[in-house]
Amino acid sequence: MNIYCSLYKVKKMLNKVMENFKKWKAIDFFWIALTTIIMILASIILWDKTDNKISMLSLIGTVMGMINVILVAKREVYMNIITAIIGEIAMGICYLHWNLLGNAVLNLAIFLPSNFAFIYWLKREKNNIVPTFRLNNKKRIILVIVTLAITLLLGLIFANINTSTPFIGDFLNADFYGGNNPMPYIDAFTLIANIIALVLMYLLYTEQWYLWVIVDVATLIIWIITATKSGSSSAIAYCVMYACWLINAVYGIKNWRKNQQIK
């Protein structure tokens, strides 16, 4: 009996996924196909033969990550969960390899709680449409102040963490940048801004996409510097991914402003 119930739930879920895909326009399918192909080709062309493990994780992380953000922009829940888990674990390990502790912690720590948050989306869903909201001006100002204050604090902490730091230092790569974080304050900003943007995303606030634009620019800078300093071609694949993510953030703003409510 339990097997039949499980199969029924899976069938119901797949039907909802198909119903959502039927609402997509040709440009939506073109965008997800184009960016997926770009990420696969970029990862293969930039494959670092000196570190096949990181290159493979980079391929998985960038492809799954790209598909995931597009699904978020389209407010698709079910496939979103699968791609998020795979992409976040793969990217988290890559970040740790390059001593970017903030982003490593972010990806490796959020993949489970982040997907529980999608239950909130399912509860708010009506007629296969997930509603969206926007913050008032007072809440926006508070958001900016909190983000900057925590960024300064975390940046100071990250600047003083290296391979000699008890416990944490054991996980860092001593061969890269002397075991130090190459960009502590940018790394700190992307960590806190990512967390705030994710919370806004799960609570269905459109402001998350404007924050993602800033985060994607900052993270793109991180990967350009990382690729330059490390000489790793795998890091360049992340530059390509975040460039695509930046475009997708604009795509997300357009999609999430439909049927938006002030809250």
Image (cartoon, rainbow, N blue to C red):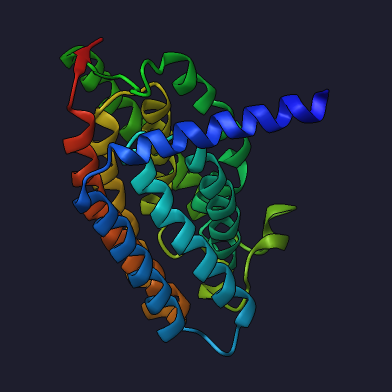
- Comparing 196 with 117, the one in front is 117
- Comparing 114 with 186, the one in front is 114
Instruction: Return the x and y of residue 193 as percentages of the image width and height.
Output: 37, 38
Q: Which residue lies at the image location 50% right of the left edge and 28% below the top edge? A: 118
Q: Is residue 184 visible?
A: no
144 lies left or right of 67: left
Outermost residue, right direction?
1
Instruction: Return the x and y of residue 153 as percentages of the image width and height.
Output: 44, 38
Q: Which residue lies at the image location 60% right of the left edge and 79% below the top edge? A: 175
- Comparing 260 with 23, the one in front is 23
Instruction: Return the x and y of residue 41 as percentages of the image width and height.
Output: 39, 78
Q: Which residue lies at the image location 48% right of the left edge and 41% below the top edge? A: 80
The quarter of the picture where the C terminus appears is top left
Q: Is residue 182 visible?
A: yes
166 lies left or right of 121: right
Instruction: Return the x and y of residue 63 as percentages of the image width and height.
Output: 45, 62
